[in-house]
Amino acid sequence: MIPKLLSPNGVNHKQLKYKDERAKVSQKRYLDQHSHPQPSLHPGDPVLIKLDGEKGWKQPGVIMNECAPRSYNVQTTGGQVRRNRRHLRFCPSGYQHPHEFMPDNTATEQPEFLPVPETSQKSESEVQPAQPLQVPTDSNPSSSTMRGVPGSPYVTRSGRAVTKPSRYRE
């Protein structure tokens, strides 16, 4: 081996610092091209919360106060949490979160059997048992999947079930 190759060479710190600064300026310029400041939130604003690893804006909350620039205290069903502005999304005041405000559908369900009117003058042999509710069926299965029940997913010709995203469900 050549002894010259084994000796350490000094690093030009001025040149290294210059290249590093130039790279930082270039990165900042390209980042700032498409970024903009987010509007500030005020106490009482309804928001949805999502952390970086989560999928979808799910947890609702209300802004309590601003702790620091871009940092807010949010009141949720689980208590009070502090979140950065990028983890909060303003939602309209009329928005109802699907998990908290589920409508009670028990009153609108149809009975399985039709009730038989009770008459005291008929004997037991004349009284007919309750008849099951008859639902008209189509001979064409594709037309029944087109209409479908509002809560059930839409099924394509290939058999894939298509469900609406949670934010579009009523």
Image (cartoon, rainbow, N blue to C red):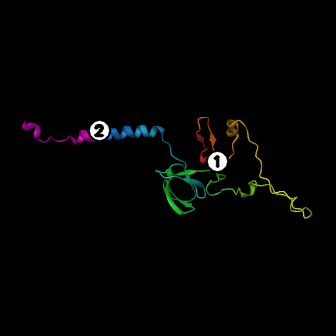
Describe residue 78's horizontal placement relative to residue 137 as left or right: left
Upstream in sequence: badge 2 or badge 1: 2
Quarter placement of the N terminus = top left
Q: At 71% across and 58% down in the image, what residue appears?
A: 106
Q: Quadrant of residue 29?
A: top left
Residue 86 relative to residue 45: left or right: left
Q: Say how many tags the image has.
A: 2
**Where is residue 139 drawn, in percent x and y?**
72, 37
Inspect the magenta stretch and tell me whether residue 165 lies in it.
no
Pick the front one: 83 or 117: 117
Residues in magenta, as a range:
2-17
Label 2–label 1 contact, CB within 8 A = no
Q: According to the image, label 2 marks what residue? A: 19
**For mark 1, what is the residue?**
169
- Residue 101 marker: none
Residue 6 percent coordinates (x, y): 10, 40
Counting from the top left corner in percent of width and height, residue 108 is at 75, 54
Residue at 74% in and 57% down: 107
Camera-nearest label, 2 or 1 = 1
> Residue drawn 60% across and 48% down?
166
Residue lying at 51% horizontally and 45% vertically, measured from the top left: 37
Depth check: give the residue in front, 94 or 161. 161
Element at label 1: loop
Residue 63 position by quadrant = bottom right
Rate crowding at label 1 as few (under 14), some (14 to 19) or many (20 or more) other CA atoms within 10 Å: few
Q: Position of residue 169 (x, y in %)?
A: 64, 47
